Amino acid sequence: MFEKTYTVTGMTCQHCVASVTEEVGELDGVRGVDVDLGTGAVTVTSDAALTDDAVRSAVEEAGYTLAA
Amino acid sequence: MFEKTYTVTGMTCQHCVASVTEEVGELDGVRGVDVDLGTGAVTVTSDAALTDDAVRSAVEEAGYTLAA
């Protein structure tokens, strides 16, 4: 199992958390998405390593930004 | 047509706006709900006068608070 934590900016409420969780959760191989609204930390667990680009695209699809 | 503007606190993003718009829009007689996220102003137009309690309940159902 792979796990990596990203930082997402722009989330302000639980609706934002739900949007990011949904979009990232739809990526192939993702088993879990844990979001800390206070810090913007998004921890993704997956069956295979994900590319940062794939995660970035999902985050942007939800309307937010992946910190560099 | 009746129109009244309320102030709602706690909305932080467009998801919040959508939630308030939906809940207030479901009240009997409501024809339109206009939300200004920046100020929290929620202007409701309706066929009949609404009670503040009805609007307050809808706002709270959405998860936010009507300013006194």
Image (cartoon, coloured by chain):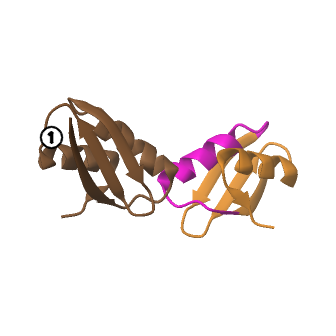
Chain colours: A brown, B orange
Residue for badge 1: A50
What chain does badge 1 belong to?
A
Q: Report x, y in % for residue B41.
A: 65, 64
Q: Residue A25, relative to residue A8: is it above or below?
A: above
The residue that appears at 61% across and 54% down in the rendered structure is B34
The residue that appears at 23% across and 35% down in the rendered structure is A46
A42 and B45: which is toward the camera = A42
Please count the marks in the image: 1
Start-end of magenta stretch? B8-29
- Going by the picture, which residue comes out furthest to the front? A1
The answer to whether residue B28 shows anywhere in this view is yes
Disc 1 crowd rating (10 Å Cα; few below 14, some 14-19, many 20+) is: some
Residue A41 colored in magenta in the image: no
The answer to whether residue B50 shows anywhere in this view is no
The residue that appears at 20% across and 29% down in the rendered structure is A28
Q: Report x, y in % for residue B56.
A: 79, 52
Circle 1 SS class? loop
Which quadrant is home to the N terminus of chain A? top left
Q: Residue B2, relative to residue A29: is it above or below?
A: below
The residue that appears at 60% across and 57% down in the rendered structure is B35
A42 and A2: which is toward the camera = A2
Left or right of B58 on screen, residue A63: left
Q: Quadrant of residue A44?
A: top left
A2 and B34: which is toward the camera = A2
Residue B20 colored in magenta in the image: yes
Left or right of A66 on screen, residue B38: right
Q: Report x, y in % for residue A61.
A: 28, 45
Q: Amino acid at mark 1?
A: Leu
Q: Report x, y in % for residue B29.
A: 78, 38
